[in-house]
Amino acid sequence: KQWYQRRVAITAGMTTGELFYGFTGNNTLKHCSKLKVNTIDAVGWNVTTSHSDVDTREILLGSSIGIVYETKLAPSFDRNSPETCRKLFSTDEGESITGLTFFHENNDANQRTAVIVATPSRLYQFYGKTKLTEGSRFLSIFRSNEFPSFKQDRPSEGIMRMFYEKYPSPSSLLWMTGSGAHFYRIKNTTESFDTRSLLCEFKLINVTKKEKSTDCDSALIPLLKSVT
C-alpha cells in the first residue's frame, strides 16, 4: 500500500509490516525502524506542513490490528531530532483501522484538534489541544477526550473519505459499511466541539453491489454529488 502528500511518499509491506518512506529529491527509501509490528492501513497527514519544512511534522498511522501510532518522518535523524513512534490508541477488539484524519478547530492549529478514526463497524471521535506529553503531541487527546462513537451493526469495508469545500478544513465525509454509504457533514467550529459532536446531517445512501466492487473513489464521488 502507498500514500502520498506533497513531497512525501509512504509505502507499507503487506506481509512484513515494515514501513518505508521517501522525500522528493531523494533517490532512496528510508526505513522506519521504530515501527515493525503489523500492516499500516491508514495515514492521517499533518496538513499544517509547508514546503519549507524539513519533515512531515507529527502524523498518525492506523494499523490492521486497530492501533493508532504517532510518528514524524524526516530525510534523516540525529540526536537533536531522533526517530520516534508512539502507540496512542487501540480500537475495540483490535478492529482494523480503515480511515484516519485530524484537523483543527476553526482551521487554527492553536485551538483544539479533532481526530476521526474509522473501522469497518465504528467511527471514533476525539478532540483536545495538542501538547507535548511523554514525547507525544496527540497522547493527551486520546487519553481523556473522546466523543460518543458511531456504531454500525452491519460492518463491511469501513472505508472513509474526506471531502473539502476549502482545503485544508474538511466539510464532509463518507463512510462505507454493510448498510450503505453514511454521509456526514463536519461542523469544524467551536459549536461542534462544545456540543460533543463533530458530525451532523446524517444521510444513509444505498450502494449497489456494482458500486462496491468498483474503484472506491470513482464510486464515492457520484454519491457525494447526490447529497450536496
Image: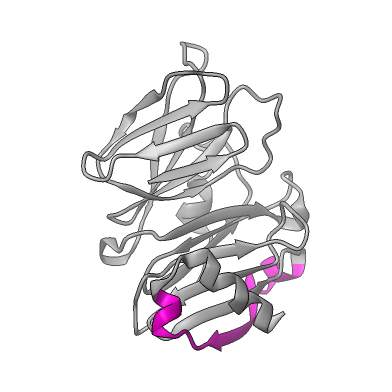
The residue segment tinted magenta is 191-212
Q: Quadrant of residue 114?
A: bottom right
Q: Position of residue 187 (x, y in %)?
A: 71, 69
Q: Residue at point 45% right, 37% down? A: 10
Residue 123: x percent and y percent?
Answer: 47, 70
Question: Relative to the observer, which residue lies in front, 97 or 217?
Answer: 217
- Please tell me how many numbered marks the rendered image carries: 0
Closer to us: 187 or 130: 187
Q: Which residue is rendered at x = 53% and y = 26% of the image?
A: 23
Image quarter in which the C terminus is found? bottom right
Task: Report the residue at 32% width, 56% height from top.
Answer: 66
- The x, y position of residue 105, in whole percent, is 72, 56
**Quarter of the rendering containing residue 126:** bottom right
Residue lying at the far top in this picture: please name it: 79
Q: Is residue 102 above or below residue 158?
A: above
Closer-to-camera residue (86/203): 203
User: Is residue 121 visible in the rendered structure shown here?
Assistant: yes
Q: Is residue 146 above or below residue 43?
A: below
Residue 53 in the image: x percent, y percent? 66, 25
Horizontal arrangement in the rendering, residue 79 relative to residue 226 (left or right): left
Q: Is residue 15 left or right of residue 171?
A: left
- Magenta-drawn stretch contains 194: yes
